[in-house]
Image (spheres, rainbow, N blue to C red):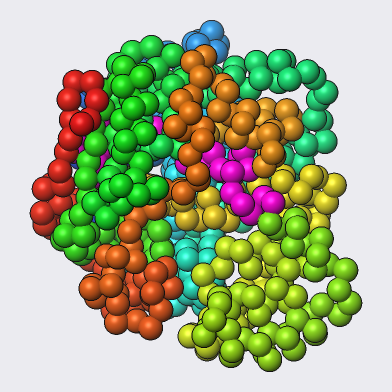
Amino acid sequence: MCGIAALYAYDDRGVAAGAGALRSASEWMRCRGPDGSGEWTSSDGRIALAHRRLAIIDLSDAGAQPMQTANGAYVISFNGEIYNYRELRSALEAKGFRFRSGTDTEVLLHLYADRGEAMMTELRGMFAFALWDEKKKGLFLARDHFGIKPLYYANDGRSIRVASEVKALLAGGSIDAAPDPAGHSGFFVWGSVPDPHTMYRGIRALPAGHTMWIDRDGARAPRSYADLATMLAKADAERVTMDSHERAERLRAAMLDSVKHHLVADVDVGVFLSAGIDSTVIASLAAEAGGKLRTVTLGFAEYRGTVHDETPVAERVAKQLGAEHSTIWVTRADFRNALEDLLARMDQPTIDGVNSYFVARAAKVAGLKVALSGLGGDELFAGYSDFRDIPRMVRLVSPLPARDSLGRMVRKAVAPLLPHFVSTKYASVIEYGGDYAGAYLLRRAVFLPWEVEEILGEGEETSDHETAIMRDLINSTLTRCSPPVKVSALEATRYMRNQLLRDADWASMTHSLEVRVPLVDWTLWREVATLGLISPYKGKRALSATPSVPLPEAVLGRRKTGFTVPMRNWMVEGEGARYDDRGLRGWAKYVYARALDGTSSGVPDGCVRRAGGDRAVQSRSSHVAV
């Protein structure tokens, strides 16, 4: 896991690859790679690559980046992990390629030399990279299938700048930082900025599952090599009939395969362990895979003795698995002390990420460099209530005649009365609830588009555009799919991609920690969809049965609470309490204001200015936290 940057002056009018701009971008990302840094510049000065290294595979200097082939034909700056790199390396060696390191980075270089852009279909992992092709005089950019790893670019028509973070590009200067209305209104609707937008007009995200080519003729439009909705639709259409035993065996094999691939590393790999099914299954399968199992659980003082306190169950599971376990306690004081650093490292405004920030810090305190997360389990195995509620809403509302006009009329009449009693969302059920895209927006929105219009003076237009994209996703690709598959595609391409995965990236890299997500794996998703297990009635039950040792009843029978932090309690006496709204709405307004006033930007003094952060209490023994 690393930070990458590139600068390519593809036009004669472009500024030559300035060492200052690239170095500033790299400097911003130093916490992403504290184990080393490097720069490479072409002989003509037009193209430069930079890299910040967090050494996970091949810890020697042979793994330093940017990395070149022996003949200098190709140079790469790579962020992420290729989990099937050993298989790919064997195939390349059989073709005569020779390797000087044990890294997956070198595998990418030789694979590109062998197959060019067609290499993308061979990769299994999380990645973003910039690869310079000296033979073709072009820059090749790529981002993984799900968008686990970020990649942003700024193209001014003369040169293009690339980095792992938006703030790294801003740190390099000379970026069009005018506001992007879609990014600003999108944040208030979704609680995160929807790809490919950012808060800035001059910066875009390379979409997940896409590549991009830039040469002396300029930048080509991003090209898709992997589309999640298309894959799910095909797998759903190919669902196979089999008995329950065969289905269980196939799922177990797929899960164990994904976990084993995600354990490949030359450093210890831990597991974020909550009291939920997803992380418990991952920890159990990791234990089956062998090696030392280390687990980490986050506890909050406000939750002690309540249903939200996950520490007792997690500690019991860790003991059963024979894990070396750490429980890290976080208090309101820790939150207040860490707030400035949290906001400074928050790459784009988000209502989430606080939980990811603290669990990543907990893993760092426990001495880990890599940790597995259960992120993605609810999106894949239909664990959210959305998988039942959205289809039900569509069935009830879709038969209503003239829904759009009737819905707007009802909303305008009812909305002013609702804040005194219930959520304003109830006013828009008819307006949005008649199709999957609208119903999904209604369930996931922090503020509805008409509320955003009141806040920003805009919102309807950009939100309508996003809703149109979702409707196209459903109508053109997933029309004949089962309702859970439709919801899964929406959850994965919206909430999971734009919020969960993005927050996991910046929050973990703030602490120089690599977070891996075995439940966000292309091969696994295809198999689960083929098995018909994207289902609110069968999915989690089937997942919980995959370990060879049954999960404890304390996990199976526990009411779903989600991985939450006591934000409402923390903000009652905090700075965010000055906003009229409480909870996530108040937090959203606070984060947005901080993003605008500039106090959450600028290179912090060190990756994390610990400000009391390491005073979090750690309960740890060689076997289990007590």
Q: Classify the position of the N terminus by image quarter.
A: top left
**In the displayed structure, does residue 200 sit left or right of residue 483?**
left
The image position of residue 251, as x and y in percent, is: 63, 22
* Magenta residues, start to end: 361-388
- Residue at (50% x, 45% y) in the render: 560
Give yes or no for residue 462 being in the magenta stretch. Answer: no
Q: Height in image: 87 above or below 528? A: above
Q: Nearer the viewer, residue 212 or 186?
A: 186
Q: Height in image: 151 above or below 291? A: below
Q: Which of 263 and 560 is in front in this view?
A: 560
Outermost residue, front side: 305
The image position of residue 353, as x and y in percent, is: 37, 55
**In the displayed structure, does residue 517 sit left or right of residue 522?**
left
Tell me, yes or no, if residue 41 can be seen here. no
The image position of residue 130, as x and y in percent, is: 44, 43
Please count the marks in the image. Answer: 0
- Residue at (58% x, 29% y) in the render: 543
Give yes or no for residue 377 being in the magenta stretch. Answer: yes
- Residue at (26% x, 59% y) in the render: 342
Q: Height in image: 411 above or below 249? A: below
Q: Which of 353 and 533 is in front in this view?
A: 533
The image position of residue 59, as x and y in percent, is: 25, 23
**In the displayed structure, does residue 373 sit left or right of residue 358?**
right
**In the displayed structure, does residue 35 sit left or right of residue 409?**
left
Q: Classify the position of the C terminus by image quarter.
A: top left
Tell me, yes or no, if residue 583 can be seen here. yes
> Where is residue 254, by image quadrant?
top right
Q: Nearer the viewer, residue 178 or 411?
A: 411
- Residue at (34% x, 55% y) in the render: 565
